[in-house]
Amino acid sequence: MTALTKPVVHITIGGVHATNEPTIIRTTLGSCISACLFDPVAGIAGMNHFMLPSVVDGDDSLRFGVHSMDHLIGKLMRLGADRARFQAKVFGGGHVLNTRESDDSVPRRNVRFIRQYLEDDGIPIVAEDLGGYVARNVEFDTSTFKVKVRKLKGLVIAAELLQKEAPKDTEAPKTGGITLFD
Amino acid sequence: MSATILIVDDSRMVRTLVRGALEAGGYTVLEAIHGAHALTQLERQTPDLMITDVNMPEMDGLTLVERARPQARFARLPILILTTETAEDLKQRGRQAGANGWMVKPFSPAQLRETVGLVLERSRSGALFARKSGTGAGSDGRK
């Protein structure tokens, strides 16, 4: 199956997709992060797209890295992946839309978060393209585990694209449901 | 209401998040990194409540419940599942294994504390296991 014939899944902020089928997962990133995780032996791979590293009370959705990563890893394991074999490729964390570069900026916090999360979980980063003053188009091929990154360097172009790619308000689920068993 | 809660999750950051939410409610928190580790922890100390993830290496959370619940000393241990899984078959397996509730991530710290408080209250009043007759009968309490 060539790249042209593989199904394409487009994710935006809060999106998580995992599969054991050859698929192209695509997204556009500004200050957000996408982690491409894969088990090369099982042929299972997935990608997420999150906006901020951690949670604040009252809005604990998949837009936040900790839940998004947990969700992605859970989906991969449910498909039969062995987390001991996970490898990661991580992208994003660009300073766009007039965000100033500082230790406390969202892009820098996102970059620190993803590196720390993967280190904590013992998942090696085998490729990365993080930071800078660019937006990025990312395409992850889940059969070859290769990632194509197209950098969008004009801030105006990046802003337009990011606006176009922005999720609908309802796209990222917030808190999940609770069922108490009798 | 003071209580000791064992949280079982393979993600350190999720454990940190859950710990923070529970400690803000005055609870004492113990941690385990997967189901097998939790069984070892339970050998040492029986908590007032256990919260476990489902997908974990070594031993998943549903197997943990299936192993722990039949033991007499854990027969009345309140157990909540906290997972990204929403599949009905998994939820039913959790229920059959003896879990007392199923919470889907992402979670709000306030919502987590509220649920834990409710389950502990029902446990202490004797209501939590009052209708358990070994048949797994009953309907979902709330959504």
Image: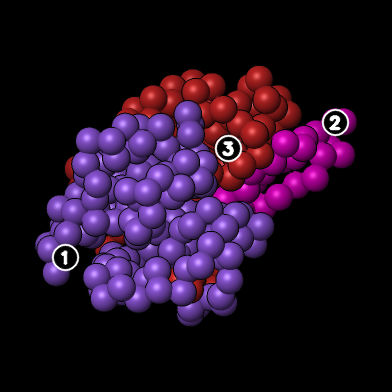
Q: Amino acid at mark 3?
A: Met
Q: Position of residue B44 (x, y in %)?
A: 22, 35
Q: Residue at x 40, y 45 (%)?
A: B71
- Check disc 2 and report its element: helix, strand or loop: loop
Q: Is residue A77 left or right of residue A8?
A: left
**Tag 3 near tag 2, CB within 8 Å:** no
Q: Position of residue A175 (x, y in %)?
A: 43, 68
Find numbered disc 3 in the image and state the secondary structure of the residue it sits on.
helix
Residue B102 appears anywhere in the view: yes
Q: Which residue is mark 1?
A: B25
Sequence-wise first label, 3 or 2? 2
**Is residue A173 visible from the viewing direction of this image?**
no
Residue A24 included in the magenta stretch of the image? yes
Chain of residue at mark 1: B
Which chain is rendered red in the image?
A: A
Q: Position of residue B3 (x, y in %)?
A: 17, 59
Name the residue beneath numbered marker 3: A77
Chain holding disc 3: A
| Residue tagged 2 | A2
Q: Which residues are magenta?
A: A1-27
Q: Which mark is residue A152?
A: none
